[in-house]
Image (spheres, helix red, strand yellow):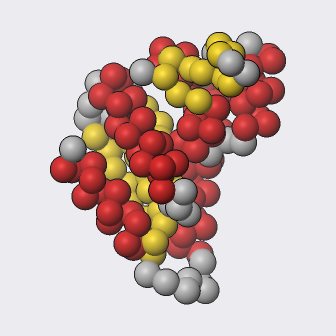
Amino acid sequence: MSYNLNQVAMFTGLTTRTLRNHLKLGVLKGEKIDGNWCFTAEDVEAYLKEPTIQQSISAKQHAIIYDFLTDAFKKENRICTIMDFPVSVEEAMDISKFFCEIISEFGCDVEFRFINERNFARFILAGSEEQVSTFMKAYYER
């Protein structure tokens, strides 16, 4: 299982520029293949275990929830869902890959965050009611 730079940015909430800086600093490991950064599940897992990275991702998770709650000018029905799954790291990475791929495929405005905690994996989806519902249904039907 491999991830590209945009997928890692999507589920961490960090910018691709930040990720490139982390690559330069050696905090994030990956391989450039045909000019594109590729990351194994192990690369991503090691990156997510870094304490400073966990703090940054946690702040981004809280921001997505806070922004959802404080947006008083929603123009459509919107959903923010938080899922805590007691799964293995491999299962968590598989779930994150599924959501990254489906969101990228449809090019929608759904925001996605993922972090692997000690005893569970947390996934956050926020966006239009229709899109989030569609993605959740697709996840449970796979």
Q: Residue at x 59, y 75 (%)?
A: 70
Work out whether residue 128 or residue 89 is closer to the camera in this orientation and state it. Answer: 128
Q: Is residue 83 above or below residue 27?
A: below
> Quick one: quadrant of the C terminus?
top left
Answer with the quarter of the image where residue 39 lies.
top right
Q: Is residue 116 above or below residue 44?
A: below
Q: Residue at x 45, y 42 (%)?
A: 101
In the figure, is residue 133 to the left or right of 62? left
Residue 37's spot in the image, x, y percent? Answer: 66, 23
Work out whether residue 50 or residue 94 is closer to the camera in this orientation and state it. Answer: 94
Query: Outermost residue, front direction?
Result: 34
Query: Outermost residue, left direction?
Result: 141
- Is residue 45 in sight in this rendering? no
> Quick one: quadrant of the N terminus?
top left
- Is residue 53 in sight in this rendering? yes
Q: Is residue 111 above or below residue 74?
A: above
Residue 102's spot in the image, x, y percent? Answer: 42, 48
Number of numbered discs overlaid on the protein picture = 0
Residue 17's spot in the image, x, y percent? Answer: 79, 36
Q: Residue at x 38, y 40 (%)?
A: 98
Q: Residue at x 42, y 35 (%)?
A: 97
Answer with the quarter of the image where residue 26 lies.
top right
Q: Is residue 36 above or below residue 65?
A: above
Residue 84's spot in the image, x, y percent? Answer: 32, 45
Work out whether residue 108 or residue 24 is closer to the camera in this orientation and state it. Answer: 108
In the figure, is residue 92 to the left or right of 57? left
Answer with the quarter of the image where residue 77 lies.
bottom left
